[in-house]
Amino acid sequence: MDRRKFLQASSLAGAAFAFGARPAWSATADAHVEILLDESIGTIAPEVYGQFTEQLGGVIYDGVWVGEDSSIPNVHGIRKQIIDRLKQIHVPVIRWPGGCFADSYDWRDGIGPRKDRPTRTNFWADDPDARRLKGNAVQLYETNAFGTDDFIRFCHLTGAEPYLASNLRSLPAMAFSRWVEYCNSPAGSTTLAKQRAANGSADPYNVKYWGVGNESWGCGGNFEPGEYAEEFRRFTTWVPHYGVPLSYVGSGPNDNNLEWTNGFFEALRKKNYMPRELRGWSVHYYTWNLSMGQTNDWVAGKRDALDFDETGWYELFLQGLYMEEIVRAQWGLLGEFDPTRNIKLVVDEYGAWYKPGTQLDPTHLLGQQVTLRDALLTAMTLDIFNRHAEKVGMAASAQLINNLNALFFSHEDKFITTPVFHVFDMYAAHQGAQSLRANFSSPQVHYQRNGKPATLAGLLGSASLSGKTVTLTATNPDLKGPKLTEIALRGSAKIASAKASVLTNGDMHAHNTFERPNVVQLKEQRVEVQGDRLTVMLPPASVSRITIQLV
Ligand code: AHR
């Protein structure tokens, strides 16, 4: 079927939708988007646009933290440029101190005068890349220069809510309870509140979000789901609230492991224990296996962040889009145990994970370059979260700086933004908006996968409404085809004006470096408005945001 016939067929097929009279699409457009203004899916929780930081490689040291005596511009030791950029994207929540590090971390090591803080072996000291580091690198021997008070200050400076991950594997429940007390007990009330005051804050931190362990099926203890449920009960029973509405996030599955979710909630149900503070069920999904079905080996399945061909471009998206299936399946199962839907999915680790070798500095363990391809993957992921706004309550890209799906790279006094930062910049407009049902229709993209034909949706995205502003975000993964896209609004409102910005580059490998920091950056794109329609050209290999003002 040629393109014109396909378009006619798809608009005819559309006539069967149950939404009443559909707009007559222009035959010259390559793709169409219909936004249903009166069909809200739910509010997009701002926390879906969260970030993740771990005491790992170059994330904190050389990344967030430069130290109070540094000549690099800083606020109380925190790199000023990262504060400014996080404010720009309205970062809503930041998770810390891990990741796997969290289950080896004693929060008491990181408070008080820095000179008195102990040095400990970092969880990541045995990572193959860590073993190549020389001497007493902080990546191997954690100095605890950055601790709870520093992290909370970082959150206050950026406007983010703190999300603390507790140590369930190697500390008792009492240590968790005491951490809550240190953070939240009222000024002057307890010994820990006085200690907090001595460390700079008489006022409580009122931390709401608490992760109860991390990857408890793996680095967080290698538990069976029933065993983890038992620990979870011990940790969360009768923790004082200090007037703060605590939200616990349980350590959920790797990928789409339904046995883990089922086993955990079955075990809680048997004990008739379902605390109302259990508001989140974490999901970790990394897009790492680009072997096209050749292996499931964690090392052999990975590919390079920079060295990829057209198949590698499309394959990343095919694997990454599995996120939607995970969200649907985990949510469905959750409903069997939580029919009132108190518990939301918290996708607090996601992004591409490539083989090592492209990090900007050897100390940046799990560091990798971030290309335009990663920007599209991140945008597709955020669009999935938006489309499932009633299911996903929080998320965090892994990780903020000098690591995996980084928004920033820094080394000493150098600091740049990556293509992924620009996606968060564009998508910030969705935070707190009403997610709208939207129908995308476009010819599929075809590529060869292991000598067999494979397909990918030709246009993906999401739409939201905040006040009189409609935000539509969309990715065009097609490497060759620009898409003249017609957008129609369904509903009573009229369009006052529209504008668009686009992130793209003629080279699918395009990325920013310290030497060339602006290779991938946002550009304005022309939008034509005609009545209740808009037309915009979405370039090949692009992420776009179209902002529509209603009368
Ligand atoms: O983000 C890197 C690591 O990936 C985290 O420490 C861990 O939770 C996950 O396995």
Image (tube, rainbow, N blue to C red):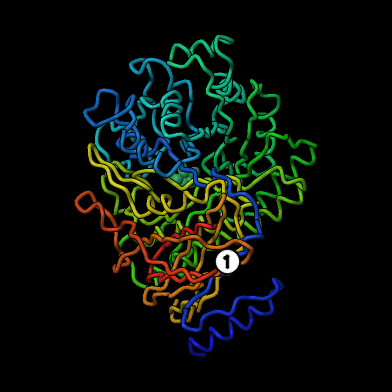
Residue 27 place in picture, x, y as percent: 50, 84
Toward which corner of the image does residue 8 lie, by quadrant? bottom right
Q: Residues within 10 Å of mark 1 (few under 14, many from 20)?
A: many
Residue 76 place in picture, x, y as percent: 34, 24
Direction from residue 211 to residue 485 in the image, left or right: left
Residue that appears at 34% across and 57% down: 522
Q: Nearer the viewer, residue 305 or 362?
A: 305
Toward which corner of the image does residue 84 lie, by quadrant? top left
Visible residue check, residue 275: yes
**Is the C terminus in the top left, top right, bottom left or bottom right quadrant?**
bottom right
Q: Is residue 60 above or below residue 28?
A: above
Residue 264 place in picture, x, y as percent: 69, 44
Residue that appears at 56% across and 38% down: 221
Direction from residue 125 to residue 195 in the image, left or right: right
Amino acid residing under circle 1 = Leu
Residue 479 place in picture, x, y as percent: 37, 73
- Residue on which disc 1 sits: 489
User: How many numbered marks have been drawn onto this rendered protein structure?
Assistant: 1
Residue that appears at 54% across and 85% down: 6
> Most extreme residue toward the left, as rendered?
515
Direction from residue 198 to residue 256 in the image, left or right: right
